[in-house]
């Protein structure tokens, strides 16, 4: 790599902002995709930095102190699980003739309301809305 003066600079620090969540009053599909991607990146980070390293320490008998961390796999499952995840439901509803927003929301409520991360208050339901309690909050 080269710095602004054109001189070679072999030392650098790269930063990936996996906490780039934003909180809006109204989110759309694009924001769901962005948050889903951030959740997937967070899960990969947790897997390789915490889960697998700690398993390796145990396997090698290295003395260490367990590091607790939030596991967001259930959020990913809510969004991308086959047949019952939000994306699968959306895909299914796109094939329904004359599908409507309320019909999609109703299917989300029927299939996802028991999931601990899926939130749909009575006020949200009247307005065909829901929330996902994820790593960065609702």
Image (cartoon, grey):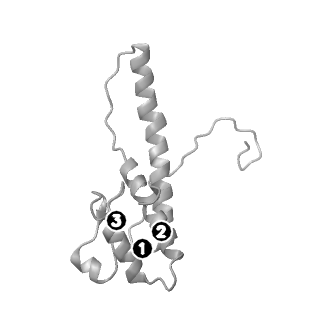
Q: How far across and how far down the image is residue 34, in percent?
A: 50, 63
Vertical comparison of 37 with 113: above or below: above
Q: Name the residue under label 1.
A: 27
Give the CA separation, mark 3 to mark 2.
22 Å
Give the CA separation, mark 3 to mark 1.
21 Å
Residue 105, quarter of the rendered image: bottom left
Question: What residue is rendered at 32% in x and 70% in y?
Answer: 109
Q: Seen in the image, is 7 located left or right of residue 28?
A: right
Question: What residue is rendered at 39% in x and 13% in y?
Answer: 61
Vertical comparison of 21 with 53: above or below: below
The total number of labels drawn is 3
Q: Name the residue under label 3.
A: 111
Q: How far across and how far down the image is residue 1, in percent?
A: 73, 42
Is the Cβ of the residue at disc 1 closer than 8 Å to that at disc 2?
yes
Task: Let me know if residue 36 appears in the view.
Answer: yes
Tell me the element at label 3.
Answer: helix
Question: What residue is rendered at 47% in x and 82% in y?
Answer: 99
Label 1 crowd (10 A; few <14 / some 14-19 / many >=20): few
Mark seen at residue 96: none
Mark seen at residue 31: 2
């Amino acid at each position: 790599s080269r710095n602004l003066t054109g001189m070679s600079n072999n030392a650098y620090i790269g930063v990936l902002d996996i906490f780039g969540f934003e909180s809006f009053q109204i989110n759309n599909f694009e924001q769901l995709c962005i948050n889903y991607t951030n959740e997937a990146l967070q899960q990969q980070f947790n897997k390789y930095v915490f889960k697998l390293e700690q398993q390796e320490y145990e396997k090698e008998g290295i003395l260490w102190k367990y590091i607790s961390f939030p596991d967001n796999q259930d959020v990913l499952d809510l969004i991308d699980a086959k047949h019952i995840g939000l994306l699968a439901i959306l895909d299914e509803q796109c094939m329904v003739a004359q599908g409507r927003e309320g019909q999609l929301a109703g299917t989300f409520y029927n299939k996802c309301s028991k999931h601990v991360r899926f939130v749909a208050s009575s006020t949200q339901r009247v307005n065909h809305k829901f929330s996902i309690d994820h790593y960065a909050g609702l």
